[in-house]
């Protein structure tokens, strides 16, 4: 994920998923990772696709698995409003098969389970040139990861997934969005970059006000820590340290803070 995974409701925007892709494909409602900041969950609740407490149950949508995909213009992101987990792996492999067989370039975004990444690498070894993995890893600290992304894999598994895809010769990328521990970002980049061939994206946690609405004291404290960690001053300092590193890319909210123009076209910031 996600990186911040988003729903089709922001399909027209030039940020979020559309900085990376011209089309998003999904086959599931709900996500077992159940991240506290999940925007897809907020949207699913708003549009009554799930009830509160139901989001962690993954409901595979048979129609979306059977769907035959044409060859789309530009890069396709899969998934964007759920993740790939051991529970929906078979369904996700079928969707990927449909997309790749028609020649689509696919950006696979995930908080990766090693078992799933191994299965994808094995099944689609002959489509290597069409696949870019982007693994969301917002911190190295497992306590922080477990707080925000309750059921997603721990750091060591995400790192092992990245290493595996890299070792198998796939193009690899990391999304540090949302950045959950800005104080640890240098160590994170240093640790992961040897297995990254493409890019490391850095982005903030957004919609903090919305998160605060129903926050208890513990969540409120964690939100405050994130807010402090992504203050303009800290973002500018991170930017100064990495602005000349071609591997590091900046999501829209950071571009706004440091004064980088934002692309007017979807899918250009790959
Ligand atoms: S991994 Fe799942 S719960 Fe977490 S942000 Fe992505 S879609 Fe939402």
Image (cartoon, helix red, strand yellow):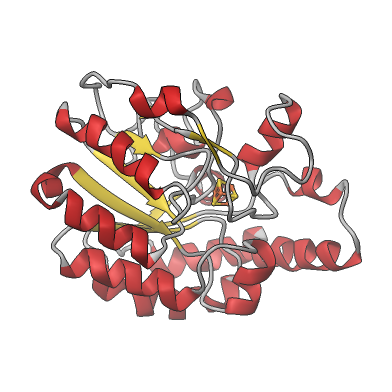
Q: Is residue 90 above or below residue 21?
A: below
Image quadrant in which you'd find residue 33: bottom right
Image quadrant in which you'd find residue 92: top left
The one of 20 and 156 positioned closer to us in this rendering: 156
Where residue 108 sits: x, y (%)?
34, 46
Q: Which residue: 61% across, 38% down?
A: 40
Where residue 155 sits: x, y (%)?
48, 75
Q: Which residue: 20% across, 21% down?
A: 71
* Residue at the right extreme, as displayed: 217
Q: Which residue: 64% across, 55% down?
A: 35
Q: Quadrant of the C terminus?
A: top left
Q: With 131 as the anchor, is 2 left or right in this view?
A: right
Image quadrant in which you'd find residue 58: top right
Q: Is residue 40 above or below residue 151?
A: above
Where residue 110 sits: x, y (%)?
42, 53
**Residue 198 in sight in this render:** no
Where residue 2 sits: x, y (%)?
49, 50
**Residue 180 in sight in this render:** yes
The one of 237 and 219 positioned closer to us in this rendering: 219
Q: How many marks?
A: 0
Q: Which residue: 41% across, 60% down?
A: 112
Q: Is residue 57 above or below residue 24?
A: below
The one of 11 and 89 positioned closer to us in this rendering: 89
């Amino acid at each position: 994920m996600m990186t911040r995974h988003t729903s089709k409701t922001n399909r027209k925007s030039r940020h979020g998923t559309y900085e990376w892709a011209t089309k998003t494909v999904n086959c599931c409602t709900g996500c077992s990772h159940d991240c506290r900041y999940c925007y897809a969950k907020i949207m699913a609740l708003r549009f009554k696709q799930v009830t509160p407490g139901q989001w962690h149950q993954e409901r595979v949508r048979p129609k979306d698995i059977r769907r035959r995909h044409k060859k789309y213009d530009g890069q396709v992101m899969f998934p964007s409003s759920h993740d790939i987990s051991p529970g929906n792996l078979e369904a996700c492999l079928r969707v990927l098969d449909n997309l790749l067989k028609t020649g689509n370039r696919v950006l696979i975004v995930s908080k990766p389970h090693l078992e799933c990444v191994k299965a994808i690498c094995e099944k689609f070894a002959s489509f290597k040139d069409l696949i870019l993995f982007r693994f969301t890893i917002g911190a190295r600290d497992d306590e922080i990861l477990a707080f925000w992304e309750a059921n997603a894999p721990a750091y060591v598994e995400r790192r092992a997934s990245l290493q595996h895809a890299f070792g198998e010769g796939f193009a690899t990328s990391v999304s540090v969005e949302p950045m959950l521990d800005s104080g640890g970002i240098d160590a994170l980049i240093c640790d992961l970059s040897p297995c990254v061939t493409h890019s490391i994206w850095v982005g903030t946690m957004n919609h903090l006000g919305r998160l605060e609405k129903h926050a208890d004291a513990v969540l409120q404290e964690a939100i405050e820590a994130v807010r402090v960690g992504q203050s303009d001053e800290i973002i500018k300092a991170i930017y100064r340290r990495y602005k000349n590193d071609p591997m590091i890319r900046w999501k829209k909210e950071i571009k706004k803070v440091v004064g980088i123009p934002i692309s007017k076209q979807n899918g250009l910031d790959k």
